[in-house]
Image (cartoon, rainbow, N blue to C red):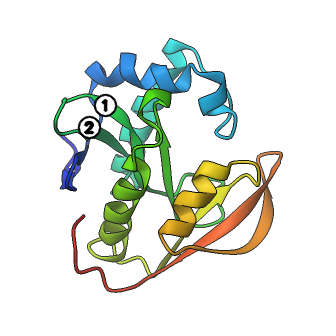
Amino acid sequence: MTGIPTLETERLWLRSWRESDLDRYFMLRGDEAATQFIGGVTSRDDTWRGIAMLLGHQILRGYSIFALEEKSTGLLVGYCGPWFPLGFPEPEIGWGLIPSEQGKGFATEAAKRALAFAFGPLGWTTAISLIAPENLPSKRVAERLGAKLEGSTEFRGRMCGIYRHAARIQTSTS
């Protein structure tokens, strides 16, 4: 298809998006609480367009946010990965989980692998995660990853903390 690699962790596949992901992804994109920090609820149609945008990012930039598939169930549980869309201040590692999948450590597990990919094959030397001050779960993920709050910026009408992920030698793929 587009050369999107499949990455692996102990419990997850970080893989390309499929049209069959739509209904599960809409469980995240259609949920008010889950989307309060990522632009708000979208319709099912706009969720489909969002998947297409992520695949387009892969073509334009050579990398993109991955779909997260739980190995034991084969179900989409969320998204995570490197991206740098137009308007972002720097390359970012982003993540999000379907509400029923939160609190299981999937975001941290996937983001560790995504960082290893960004700092390894992609050759990044740094990355950020933009996180709203009220988004306590994402702040905790960033902190578990070793990211440091280095300041804040207004981004798309909202103040966000800039959490800096420093490049370091990654010896594990999980």
Horizontal and vertical percent position of residue 1: 17, 39
Residue 54 found in image quarter: top left
Report if the CB atoms under discs 2 and 1 are less than 8 Å apart.
Answer: yes
Question: Under tag 1, what secondary structure?
Answer: strand
From the viewer's perspective, is 59 left or right of 100? left
The one nearer the camera, 33 or 26, is 33
The one nearer the camera, 173 or 157, is 173
Disc 2: which residue: 69
- The disc at residue 162 is none
From the viewer's perspective, is 15 left or right of 32? left
Residue at 36%, 39% (x, y): give it.
55
Residue at 29%, 76% (x, y): give it.
120
Sooner in the amino-acid sequence: mark 2 or mark 1: 2
| Three-letter code, disc 2 | Glu
Disc 1: which residue: 76
The one nearer the camera, 168 or 5, is 168
How many neighbours does mark 1 have within 10 angstroms: few (below 14), some (14-19), or many (20 or more)?
Answer: many
Q: Residue furthest front?
A: 103
Residue 4's place in the image compared with 126, above or below, is: above
Residue 111's place in the image compared with 156, above or below, is: below
